[in-house]
Amino acid sequence: MGVQQRNNVRILGDGPATLVFAHGFGCDQNMWRLVAPAFADRFRVVLFDLVGSGGSDLSSYDRHKYDSLDGYADDLVEVVQGFGQGPVVFVGHSVSAMIGTVADARSPGLFAAHIMIGPSPCYINDGDYTGGFSRDDIDSLLDTMSGNYLGWSSTMAPSIMGAPDQPELAVELTNSFCRTDPEVARQFARVTFLSDNRRDLHRLASPCLILQSSDDIIAPVEVGDYLHRALSNSTLRVIDNVGHCPHLSAPRACIDAMDAFLKTLDLPDAS
């Protein structure tokens, strides 16, 4: 089976450089609809679904392959090699930011830069490190998902989305969670929330933009500060936003921050 069908790859626009967008847990490429088109007049924009999500080919899901972020990183490398042209900037939301970090280490030079939206290298508090959750918190979350995934989705999605003045977005995220195969979602949640990519950060030398919401229950501001310290070539931008999905609830602020960062890179001019 080809990569395009496996990951439901879609191309927007054209340009001498490429932006590759990857969604977070329980989401799909449609979550980029308010941001990605803003770049299609200057860049080749590549959208895709992680296997098990959105319009990806569910028959390609392999529990062994996707029992760590490595399997998703291997897929990302294939997507970039198959559909990127010119320098490639990777835009990853939440866990996909770390999938991009793993892919960068596996294929050095593949990415010219990274844009991380609501990233977290580790969700569990550890000594002086603040990830936002205790191990008991994560175990309880995973137990609840195992027992009643749909109930967990309807309860947690509004808190994850935030954006109290845009309740329709919480409904959208709830529906997106509920469309995901429960077995796939449970495994991906375990892989996501138990991952620890802090040791991978020192190998990421390419420029990075960290986009952090000012109020995010999944990736608190302390995580953004940690990443900024750990990544030697990083820029931290805190967006005034409540919730974990600023590309939906504060798209203009995300576009402006991304634009400012992209202008600092040595990328070919679309004009």
Image (cartoon, helix red, strand yellow):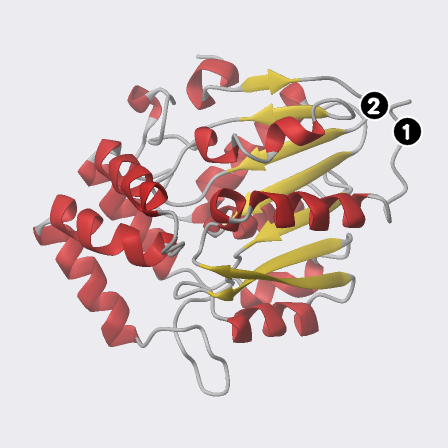
Counting other residues with Cα less than 10 Å from the Cα at mark 1, is it few (<14), some (14-19), or many (20 or more)? few
The quarter in which the N terminus is drawn is top left
Is 148 rendered above or below residue 109? below
Is 252 rendered above or below residue 176? below
The CA distance from mark 1 to mark 2 is: 7 Å
Q: Going by the image, does 19 lie left or right of 265?
A: left
Q: Which mark is residue 219?
A: none
Query: 58 or 237: which is nearer to us?
Result: 237
The residue at which mark 1 appears reads as: 269
Name the residue located 85 percent from the left edge and 44 percent from the top edge: 263
The reply to whether the C-beta atoms of the residues labelled 1 and 2 are less than 8 Å apart is yes
Residue type, numbered disc 2 = Pro
Name the residue located 29 percent from the left edge and 74 percent from the top edge: 135
Residue type, numbered disc 1 = Asp
Q: Secondary structure at mark 1?
A: loop
Counting other residues with Cα less than 10 Å from the Cα at mark 2, is it few (<14), some (14-19), or many (20 or more)? some
The quarter in which the C terminus is drawn is top right
Is 204 rendered above or below residue 230? above
**Residue 181 found in image quarter:** top left
From the top left corner, tell me how far across and down residue 229 is, in percent: 69, 74
Query: Can residue 105 be seen by looking at this rendering?
Result: no
Name the residue located 32 percent from the left edge and 37 percent from the top edge: 172
Q: Going by the image, does 79 lie left or right of 157?
A: right
From the top left corner, tell me how far across and down residue 41 is, in percent: 75, 22
Query: 106 or 218: which is nearer to us?
Result: 218
Q: Which is closer to the viewer, label 1 or label 2?
A: 1
Query: 203 or 267: which is nearer to us?
Result: 267
Q: Which mark is residue 16?
A: 2
Name the residue located 55 percent from the left edge and 50 percent from the top edge: 97
**Residue 90 found in image quarter:** top right
